[in-house]
């Protein structure tokens, strides 16, 4: 069976070192064959981003350039419909085949809100789920709503190698290095005319400044 492929979706508004470190540690800890970044075109679960989908896609491409383990999927940006995870996974299944292990990368906060996702129960038939959490604060059933807690109890695996044994259906968790960085923080710094350097790659920051993104009008 092929190496598991990580899938990392989000608005990336903007992409920053916290995102990059999560994807890098996922490859290392989960023995992934790579991570495919999937910027959302029209996010369905939040207010529209202040910058265009094309600009967010461009920033992700700049951020991942030079890392052979990363690739970028532009399909959600190019589609003229709201972005939902299950249709994206169905598209990737059609592209990559039924047997390739796919691993959807989430943060612990995203897992806790999974019940609000469109067709969320169908995720497990299409991919594994890997949840990144803070060191010392593991994901447990007690921290989740009942329906999600039941899925975690039934599906959680401790052996990361088990991701290769099936194309989908398991939940694994991994502790990642905590970087106190958020896209909201970066947007606020830019709006206030303050420095965001060392919170995101220089080429992404240069793009933001060149295009005057996140500035108060």
Image (cartoon, rainbow, N blue to C red):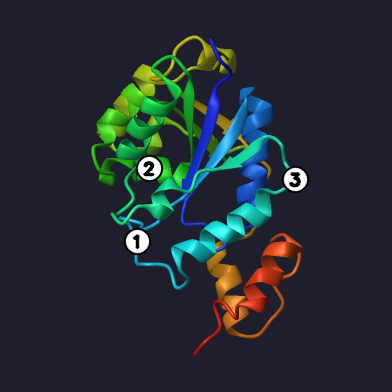
Coordinates of residue 49 in the picture (x, y in percent): 42, 68
Coordinates of residue 79 in the picture (x, y in percent): 35, 52
Q: Nearer the viewer, residue 81 or 35?
A: 81
User: CA–CA distance between discs 3 and 2?
Assistant: 33 Å
Mark 3 or 2, nearer chain start? 3
Q: From what the image shows, is residue 97 above or below residue 59?
A: above
Q: Nearer the viewer, residue 124 or 144?
A: 124
User: Are the two marked residues, 3 and 2, in contact with CB atoms closer than 8 angstroms?
Assistant: no
Residue name at image x 45 percent, y 62 percent: 53
Residue 69 image-quadrant placement: top right
Horizontally, residue 122 falls left or right of residue 162, namely: left
User: Are the two marked residues, 2 and 1, in contact with CB atoms closer than 8 angstroms?
Assistant: no
Residue name at image x 58 percent, y 35 percent: 35
Mark in the foreground, 1 or 3? 3
Residue name at image x 36 percent, y 26 percent: 94
Q: Which mark is residue 66?
A: 3
Residue name at image x 56 percent, y 63 percent: 14
**Which residue is labeled 2 in the image?**
112
Coordinates of residue 166 in the picture (x, y in percent): 45, 12
Quick check: can you spot residue 179? no
Mark 2: give few (<14), some (14-19) or many (20+) Cα within 10 Å.
some
| Secondary element at tag 2 | helix
**Which residue is labeled 1 in the image?**
46
Mark in the foreground, 3 or 2? 3
Mark in the foreground, 2 or 1? 1
| Secondary element at tag 3 | loop
Horizontally, residue 135 falls left or right of residue 92, namely: right
Q: From what the image shows, is residue 10 above or below residue 55?
A: above
Coordinates of residue 196 in the picture (x, y in percent): 69, 72
């Amino acid at each position: 069976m092929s190496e598991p492929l990580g899938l990392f979706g989000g608005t990336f508004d903007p992409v920053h070192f916290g995102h990059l470190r999560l994807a890098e540690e996922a490859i290392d800890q989960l023995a992934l064959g790579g991570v495919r970044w999937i910027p959302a075109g029209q996010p369905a679960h939040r207010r529209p981003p202040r910058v265009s989908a094309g600009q967010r896609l461009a920033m992700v491409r700049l951020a991942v350039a030079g890392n052979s383990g990363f690739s970028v999927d532009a399909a959600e940006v190019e589609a003229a419909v709201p972005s939902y995870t299950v249709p994206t996974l169905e598209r990737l299944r059609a592209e990559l085949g039924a047997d390739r292990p796919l691993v959807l990368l989430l943060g612990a906060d995203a897992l806790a809100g999974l019940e609000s996702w469109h067709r969320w129960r169908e995720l497990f038939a299409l991919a594994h789920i890997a949840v990144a959490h803070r060191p010392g604060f593991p994901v447990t059933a007690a921290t989740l709503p009942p329906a999600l807690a039941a899925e975690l109890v039934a599906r959680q695996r401790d052996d990361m190698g088990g991701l290769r044994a099936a194309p989908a259906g398991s939940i694994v968790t991994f502790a990642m290095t905590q970087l106190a960085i958020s896209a909201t923080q970066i947007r606020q710094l830019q709006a206030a005319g303050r420095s965001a350097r060392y919170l995101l790659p220089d080429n992404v920051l240069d793009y933001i400044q060149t295009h005057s993104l996140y500035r108060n009008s």
